[in-house]
Amino acid sequence: MKHIPIRLGPLALLLAVISICMTTLGILTFTTARADLSMAEKYAATVQTRYGLEEEGQKFLLEAGKALEEGMDLQSLPDTTTDTEGVTWKRITDGDYSLMVGLRLKEDQGERLGIVSWKITKAWEEDTSMGNLWNGE
């Protein structure tokens, strides 16, 4: 019986390439999972802040409704300003986010409260660390 020698060189090379590919894919998977977790945590914090602002805005609406039921006007509410058009504004802030609520009495519906504006914004500053690349012209 004739004995056929087995060449281990190509087999060892193939196993080395497979193990390098599997290691690289494992590292990329781990890095992507960490990035996804970080992004999910940032998103969760943003949503929590926005929902907190919405809750505070709803409390302000309740306070304004109770003030109207007691015969008070909207200008008497604390931390509010009233413009020349009769819109009472309240700004509620939480960190970089703020909720701007505008309320007005609806004359045609008999002293009913109407929401003129309900807008959540975030403070933003331009990143100038790279210089002014484009001046917008």
Image: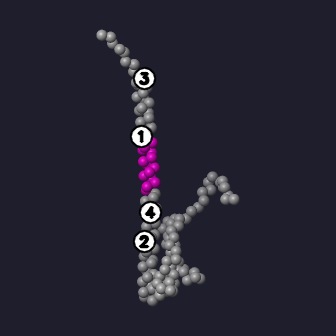
Extent of the magenta region = 26-41
Of the numbered discs 1 and 4, the one sitting upstream in the chain is 1
Is residue 79 in sight in this rendering? Answer: no
Element assignment for label 4 = helix
Given contact means CB atoms under 8 Å apart, are the residues at marks 3 and 2 in contact?
no
Q: Residue at x 43, y 39 (%)?
A: 25
Q: Quadrant of the C terminus?
A: bottom right
What residue do we see at 62% from left, 54% from top? 129
Q: Earlier in the sequence, mark 3 or mark 2?
A: 3
Q: Dot 3 corresponds to which residue? A: 10
Residue beneath label 1, please? 26
Q: Position of residue 52 (x, y in %)?
A: 43, 68
Percent across and percent down for residue 59 are: 42, 76
Q: Position of residue 16 (x, y in %)?
A: 42, 29
Q: Earlier in the sequence, mark 3 or mark 1?
A: 3
Answer with mark 4 or mark 3, whichever residue precedes in sequence: 3
Residue highlighted by disc 4: 47
Give yes or no for residue 32 being in the magenta stretch.
Answer: yes
Q: Residue at x 42, y 21 (%)?
A: 9
Q: Which residue is mark 2?
A: 55
